[in-house]
Amino acid sequence: MVEIWRGERLESLHHGHAVICDASGAVVESWGNPGAVIYPRSSCKMIQALPLLESGAGAGLSTERLALACASHQGGRGHVEAVERWLADMGLGEASLRCGAHEPADREERNRLICTGDSACQLHNNCSGKHAGFVMLNRHLGGDAEYVAPDHPVQRAVRATFEEVTGEDSPGYGIDGCSAPNFACTVAGLGRAMAAFACATEGGDRRQQAMVRLRDAMMLHPEMVAGEGRACTELMRAMRGAAAIKTGADAVFVAILPRQKLGIALKIADGGTRGAEAAIVALLARAGVLDAGHPAALKRLGGPQTNWRGKVTGETRLAAGFPG
Amino acid sequence: MVEIWRGERLESLHHGHAVICDASGAVVESWGNPGAVIYPRSSCKMIQALPLLESGAGAGLSTERLALACASHQGGRGHVEAVERWLADMGLGEASLRCGAHEPADREERNRLICTGDSACQLHNNCSGKHAGFVMLNRHLGGDAEYVAPDHPVQRAVRATFEEVTGEDSPGYGIDGCSAPNFACTVAGLGRAMAAFACATEGGDRRQQAMVRLRDAMMLHPEMVAGEGRACTELMRAMRGAAAIKTGADAVFVAILPRQKLGIALKIADGGTRGAEAAIVALLARAGVLDAGHPAALKRLGGPQTNWRGKVTGETRLAAGFPG
């Protein structure tokens, strides 16, 4: 799918699987193996957030909080404080989370922690918004505090929803970086779910209404879904509401195209994020929702790659035949 | 070659090319395509350092400085100060370097820079030791200050040496992260060069003497070649002088095995570093120079991978048939 060039020579190569699904859930175009079973990782956060809305637990949530529920954020002050306020509004704190702590990717907040000697907490975890959503759903369902256990009511609800929107029985789960179970599906199943998000209307059923709220919240708050410099944020800004997109660890990327009523899902087989970012740029540009010449696109595909002295070293190109 | 497992399922997969070469320079074993043309990137720093010694320019250099010339270091205080002293001994400073500056990977030094408001300088660049070697060679050759220009006497000397030890005419070069030209070769050619380093003896010719000094310096100062936590440092410590190894960007790894008189070179086709680290662990263990049960080995192959809460998420395994 994607070639990494240095000078006049191909240096590295990313293979992968991708699908485009339509309103019927059918795969209308595919590359690689649409039946490949993958872990969607964080690319399925909008699916994991559906039970929060469908149950009514998240009825009054702001669009900002809905975007955070679908986010892999940078752990910037804005993200951390928003999740903290969300938990506080439930009368809870950081200790109710089960995502673990890691150093934030946001440089300003990272530097602040380093210089004040503060430790990163679970609020900084890129998944803390998703976990706040789990906590809120859990309060509604009345489960115990260990909401990441695979047989916990929260995760049982997530699994049932996941299987319905992918149209598949999940063959199993892996434990994600944030300790939640991550259910496996095919690339086609993930694309089918994204097409359902794309086709959902406000006049539809409870699920469709939830899908509309989540996808619109992501497009409304690109800075909440990831952060400055990141692919999801920069590309959603560039597309100005034409698509909601989300990355997942180990090189998954999905896109929801409401105007075209299409869903996209892709996985780079080797897990290389640069490959997934270039591939989604290619598919979004081909679908007409992203200008391939926009700086956010060129940074990931086709533009010059530079080194520490600003010298051009090479570029990222599409492999022959992709996307065709 | 290498499989990334999460739970009960394969999540990602790394393909690659690898060779083992013997004293004659012949490929005695190979996987993938030994004729694949690659950029060795930083894995060939010991080759790039040969002209420094063969010319006599680096005659009196300490083993520590020789290790630094072959290093992709972390930019820790020890690395930075050692390179600074080396330049000072030539009556020069940081401004003589042409590698560019980047934030050091060493956390202590990184945090110090952040909290004092200091900027990272070229001494922090992981290639600053190699560049100090280039500067020293340049002083001997009398070239102009722009020693990274591909037609500069320093780089002409590097290219000639590189072609001799790989036994190939290089088909060209790319500009590396540190702005120096990086000459392309086949995986077999890179393995051949490593075998030459492995077979070199102190009683040999000028080149062999230079090879012995560089390879021994690397094994004597694993902490100078990379830094705490890094594969080259941890694995060389674990092997206690049985092999000199070096990583290169975009998933290249080489090994020099003096006792076995063997050279190893490998490239993961997608550029995934985790794949290269697992593959070199497998080949070193198979060659009998690394205990596969050593913590430094298990961290990269076969041991449990954990998440932010210390929960086991999966493991890195060898693909069927590799290394056999």
Image (spheres, coloured by chain):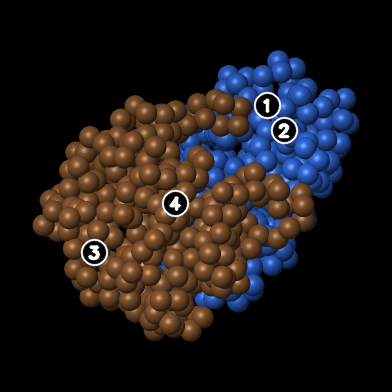
Chain colours: A brown, B blue
Tell which circle, 3 or 4, labels the residue nearer the N-terminal end. Answer: 4
Looking at the picture, which amino acid does disc 1 mark?
Arg
Where does residue A63 sit, x and y in percent of width and height?
Answer: 40, 52
Is circle 4 on the same chain as circle 2?
no
Residue A319 shows in this picture: no
> Label 4 vs label 2: CA separation?
42 Å
Task: Please state which of the two labelled residues, at mark 3 or mark 1, is closer to the viewer.
Answer: 3
The residue to which callout 3 is attached is A207
Q: Is residue A91 or residue A133 the one in the foreground?
A: A91
Asked if disc 3 and disc 2 are in contact, CB closer than 8 Å, the reply is: no
Where does residue A71 sit, x and y in percent of width and height?
Answer: 44, 55
Q: Is residue A157 or residue A66 the one in the foreground?
A: A66
Q: Residue at x 51, y 41 (%)?
A: A228
Q: Secondary structure at mark 3?
A: helix
The residue to which callout 4 is attached is A64
Looking at the picture, which amino acid does disc 3 mark?
Arg
Crowding at dot 4, Cα within 10 Å, few <14 / some 14-19 / many 20+, comes out as: many
The residue to which callout 2 is attached is B122
Q: Residue at x 11, y 57 (%)?
A: A24
Q: Is residue B34 left or right of residue B259?
A: left
How many numbered marks have been drawn onto this rendered protein structure? 4
Q: Chain of mark 2?
A: B
Looking at the picture, which amino acid does disc 4 mark?
Glu
> Label 1 vs label 2: CA separation?
8 Å
> Label 1 vs label 4: CA separation?
46 Å
The residue to which callout 1 is attached is B98
Q: Secondary structure at mark 4?
A: helix
Asked if disc 4 and disc 2 are in contact, CB closer than 8 Å, the reply is: no
Residue B234 to residue B44: above or below = below
